[in-house]
Image (cartoon, grey):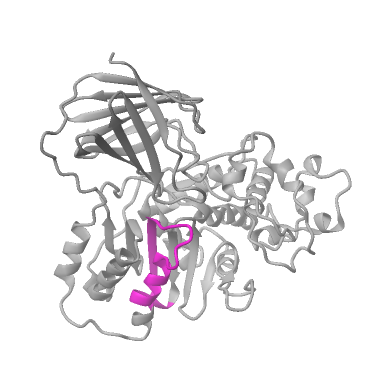
């Protein structure tokens, strides 16, 4: 089946005040939340969508732990087909990787315990740690202590979802990705998507998916429809309703949202969300028959996220029957059109006119950078960096974004994510005659690198920081000296 767009309609026809959406966008801006894309649908039809340049509707975005809801869906399909039971023992699927003498708690752990984050573990194995492991992730999972009786203690551990993915592959003979591609993608008319794998060829489960925002909406709509799409039951209704906690909800601790089958349930506001690190959301509001998809870059320790602003500005007012205070549609449209993450890049007086390549040899540094190469043209700056991974380039447009791909080293600033083919929009401008600024916006992720190259005679100082990360936001300064001008 080919890609199918959802039907579009106006906010007014959808019955959603434009004022509420405008205030949502403004509050995100006020709280330094860098929205990349937003799409809202009601009754299965899109009534608002916005993309901050350079992001766009056909550029997929890495959704981090929202991936867990897709792993749950693959498990739900196996369950629907009678290949998997919630009470199946985890250790029975991969006994060759289990400890020689497993504990009673390890032997008791079930598939349901994995999905509801009640495996009995009390330490996380998150995606950034898994990405550094080059051997068996299954073996690593079974090395984790299980100090609590499974089913009795909630603890969020990404390793549980990887094991769910591994079990899906064991019982279906297909990766979780292949299961979704076979039974979900064609039915919903989604675009093909990518999903990273472990060294043993198992979908990471806990993260690793990149999706276009409209496909996030479709996925949410499937769950809002209790697993049904166009009159066809794709996932067993029982599984879809368990996933949202419509019965058998999973309590964490008092005051926390419920956590069901990888959907957070905000009871008071009637919101269910599949959430991903750094501000990725697929939120359902059954009482309003609404789905909201958001991709963004939100600080790891942000005091408020787009989900909370969504509740305050749109969901709660609508549930309370609040009315619009005037005509806001034109204001909202202007707000939407001017969503733009391009930096302010004015041309300075006496801007350097450099048309040659410059190679700089780096002093010893933590990032193992050996050379930095700068090639100047009238409308671009080609930046080369050689380190332990080889020589890689970023092609930056002068005072405008230039689209391209790069294999430049990113993991230490990008939550341990590393690719040889990152989609990047890059721009460069002279802040002063001896300070060159660049932005490398990695368009399929939350990350944007801010680069400063300071020229001091035959020496440069290279500084690099990032907008959001799970660890450090900045790397140590690298000093390099002119080697030649060729």
Please give the count of numbered marks on the rendered protein: 0
Residue 299 falls inside the magenta stretch = yes
Q: What segment is highlighted magenta in the picture? A: 287-315
The image shows residue 217 at horizontal and vertical percentages of 39, 59
From this viewpoint, is residue 265 visible? yes
**Which quarter of the figure is the C terminus placed in?**
top left
Q: Residue 103 versus residue 32: which sits nearer the camera?
A: 32
Q: Is residue 286 left or right of residue 450?
A: right
Q: Residue at x 38, y 46 (%)?
A: 60
Q: Examine the rendered structure and indicate whether residue 287 appears above or below residue 334.
A: below
Q: Residue 403 versus residue 249: which sits nearer the camera?
A: 403
Q: Residue at x 17, y 74 (%)?
A: 328
The image shows residue 150 at horizontal and vertical percentages of 76, 63
The image shows residue 42 at horizontal and vertical percentages of 34, 69
From this viewpoint, is residue 1 visible? no
Dividing the picture into quadrants, the one containing residue 285 is bottom left
Residue found at the far left of this picture: 349
Residue found at the far right of this picture: 101
**Which quarter of the figure is the N terminus placed in?**
top left
Q: Examine the rendered structure and indicate whether residue 303 appears above or below residue 463.
A: below
The image shows residue 322 at horizontal and vertical percentages of 30, 85
Residue 180 falls inside the magenta stretch = no
Residue found at the far front of this picture: 457
């Amino acid at each position: 089946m080919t890609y199918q767009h959802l039907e579009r309609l106006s906010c007014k026809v959808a019955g959603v005040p434009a004022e509420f959406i405008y205030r949502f966008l403004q509050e995100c801006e006020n709280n330094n939340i860098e929205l990349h894309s937003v799409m809202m649908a009601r009754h299965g039809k899109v009534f608002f969508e916005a993309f901050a340049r350079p992001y766009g509707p056909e550029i997929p975005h890495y959704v981090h732990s929202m991936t867990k809801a897709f792993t749950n869906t693959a498990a739900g399909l196996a369950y629907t087909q009678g290949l998997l039971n919630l009470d199946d023992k985890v250790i029975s699927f991969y006994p060759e990787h289990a400890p020689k003498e497993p504990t009673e708690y390890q032997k008791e752990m079930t598939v349901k315990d994995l999905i509801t984050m009640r495996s009995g573990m009390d330490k996380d194995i998150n995606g950034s740690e898994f990405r550094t492991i080059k051997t068996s992730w299954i073996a690593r999972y079974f090395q984790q202590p299980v100090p609590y009786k499974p089913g009795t203690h909630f603890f969020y551990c990404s390793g549980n979802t990887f094991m769910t993915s591994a079990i899906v592959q064991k019982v279906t003979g297909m990766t979780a990705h292949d299961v979704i591609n076979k039974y979900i993608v064609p039915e919903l008319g989604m675009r093909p998507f990518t999903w990273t794998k472990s060294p043993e060829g198992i979908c990471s489960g806990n993260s690793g998916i990149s999706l276009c925002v409209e496909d996030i909406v479709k996925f949410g709509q499937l769950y809002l429809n209790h697993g049904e799409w166009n009159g066809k039951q794709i996932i067993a209704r029982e599984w879809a309703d368990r996933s949202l906690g419509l019965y058998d909800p999973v309590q964490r601790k008092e005051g926390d949202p419920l956590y069901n089958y990888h959907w957070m349930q905000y009871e008071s506001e009637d919101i269910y969300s599949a959430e991903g690190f750094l501000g990725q959301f697929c939120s359902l509001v059954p009482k309003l028959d609404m789905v909201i998809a958001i991709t963004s870059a939100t600080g790891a320790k942000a005091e408020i996220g787009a989900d909370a602003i969504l509740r305050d500005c749109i969901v709660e007012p609508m549930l309370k029957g609040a009315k619009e205070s005037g005509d806001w549609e034109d204001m909202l449209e202007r707000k939407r059109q001017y969503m733009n993450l391009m930096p302010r890049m004015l041309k300075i007086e006496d801007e350097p006119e450099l048309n040659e390549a410059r190679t700089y040899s780096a002093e010893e540094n933590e990032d193992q950078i050996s050379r930095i190469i700068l090639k100047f043209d009238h409308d671009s700056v080609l930046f080369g960096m050689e380190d332990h991974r080889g020589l890689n380039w970023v092609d930056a447009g002068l005072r405008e974004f230039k689209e391209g791909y790069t294999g430049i080293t990113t993991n230490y600033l990008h939550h341990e994510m590393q690719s040889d083919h990152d989609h990047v929009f890059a721009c460069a401008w002279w802040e002063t005659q001896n300070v060159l600024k660049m932005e490398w916006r990695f368009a399929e992720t939350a990350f944007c690198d801010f680069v400063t190259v300071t020229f001091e005679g035959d020496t440069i100082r290279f500084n690099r920081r990032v907008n959001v990360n799970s660890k450090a936001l900045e790397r140590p300064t690298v000093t390099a000296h002119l080697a030649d001008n060729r």
